[in-house]
Amino acid sequence: MSQIPNSLPSYLQADQLGPWGIFLQQVERVTPYLGELSRWVDTLTRPKRILIVDVPIHMDDGSVAHFEGYRVQHNTSRGPGKGGVRFHQDVTLSEVMALSAWMSIKNAAVNVPFGGAKGGIRVDPRQLSRGELERVTRRYTSEIGLIIGPTKDIPAPDVNTNEQVMAWMMDTYAMNLGENSTGVVTGKPIELGGSLGRRDATGRGVFTVGQEAAARTGLELKGARVAVQGLGNVGSVAARLFAEAGSRVVAVQDHGGTIYQGAGIDIPALIEHARHNGSVLGFPGAEAIAKDSFWDVDCDILIPAALEQQITAANAGRIKARLVIEGANGPTTPEADDILHQRGVLVLPDVIANAGGVTVSYFEWVQDFSSFFWTEEEINARLVRIMREAFASVWQVAEQHQVSLRTATFIIACQRILRARELRGLYP
């Protein structure tokens, strides 16, 4: 009998795609710790479903423009797919595949009953009018409508998408279905079934695991120096919460530039400044520094909360922080991870550190099904409890196997995913 090769298709191979290749390396590192479940590990290296769609719309000037859209469902063994939708001019299939896979890991790590999914459109939303943005959103939703749904795959906000985009997605899906369906997306406006606490959830999760790690490593948060890359939804909330805990946020970098203030930046004032001026640049009392100098800032805690692959082998050796808390998805390359580990820098990986958002998305989904909504205090308390319990489990596994927190998180998550796969079996 001839042996059927079990190699990956070329478009899934690690050496051909950036972010997806990083995920494959992470799976390879964790495989030796999976025991008998390792026979199922190829499940993780092959997304369940990849949908590439054309998104044509009428532009305001009467022309027709075409944009490329994606929705990837990485794994649904533990529940429906769950993951955001990003609108960005640099979105690629590799990126969306990797993000969907990290969602599988993240959901399993905090033990919410979701699989991993992600979506995106290659478009610069800053170049679109509000009407064009709505038409792109609705056409994309119609194109992916056959694979999403409250029990199939639940999108959410991500880079350059927000509550309004989710409202358009929900309405489009409902109109096509012919009935209301609030649970098809999360991150919606409160008026349409959104959850209290969702807006701050990811940043609150970043702060919570940072607080736990600081306590275990003897780092006093009061007076600790913090540097934050990205002042979007995640970075701004994390910066505010650390500042409220007595930390000094000494450096902030966004798409417009980088500022430094050794005595500590007034975060609420900075957020207001950036909202009015489009960037942190020009903030009174702060010094503008070169973009690359951000990695040389003398700090105790570094929070990369922007985009993927920001900490690389080229700058990891310059980082002075004791803790790196990944607010963004995939901000550290495997090579940089090794360098930081060798230097004794503790990295709190994205798959646990920024899982607060999907945790409260789970709360929103549950509330939509029951049409019974919780108070913000209840939501924050439940979020903190889940994040602390998940972090404690990861810390224990890391100590048990003497591995990094990232590998420990992958051990826990992959075991949960593959155990579900094994129990369900293969059909037909």
Image (tube, helix red, strand yellow):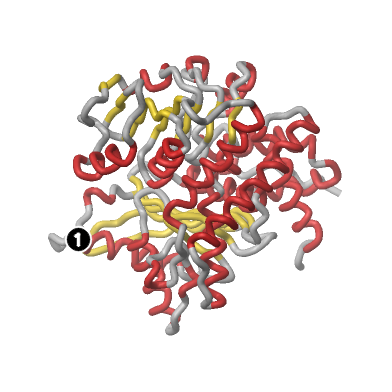
Q: Position of residue 223 (x, y in %)?
A: 47, 26
Q: Which residue is disc 1 drawn over?
A: 59
Q: Residue furthest left?
A: 61
Q: Is residue 211 left or right of residue 422?
A: left
* Residue 213 placement: quadrant: top right
Q: Nearer the viewer, residue 122 or 384?
A: 384
Q: Position of residue 247 (x, y in %)?
A: 45, 31
Q: Position of residue 313 (x, y in %)?
A: 52, 20
Which residue is depicted at the point 34% across and 30% down?
253
Q: Amino acid at mark 1?
A: Met
Count of numbered circles on the image: 1
Q: Residue furthest bottom?
A: 178
Q: Look at 75% across and 57% down and name the residue there.
A: 421
Q: Is residue 193 left or right of residue 421?
A: left
Residue 144 sits above or below residue 48 on the image: below
Please name the residue shown 40% across and 32% down the image: 229
The answer to whether one can see residue 147 in this image is: no
Q: Residues within 10 Å of mark 1 (few under 14, many from 20)?
A: some
Task: Decide which of 290, 228 is in the foreground and name it.
Answer: 228
Judge whether 370 appears above or below 230 on screen. Answer: below
**Residue 221 visible within the image:** yes
Relative to 29, residue 355 above or below? below
SS for tag 1? loop
Residue at position x 41%, y 66% in the image:
143
In the rendered view, does 255 fall on the left or right side of 235? left
Q: Nearer the viewer, residue 140 or 326?
A: 326
The C terminus - image quarter: bottom right
The percent position of residue 225, horizontal first and vertical second, equals: 45, 25
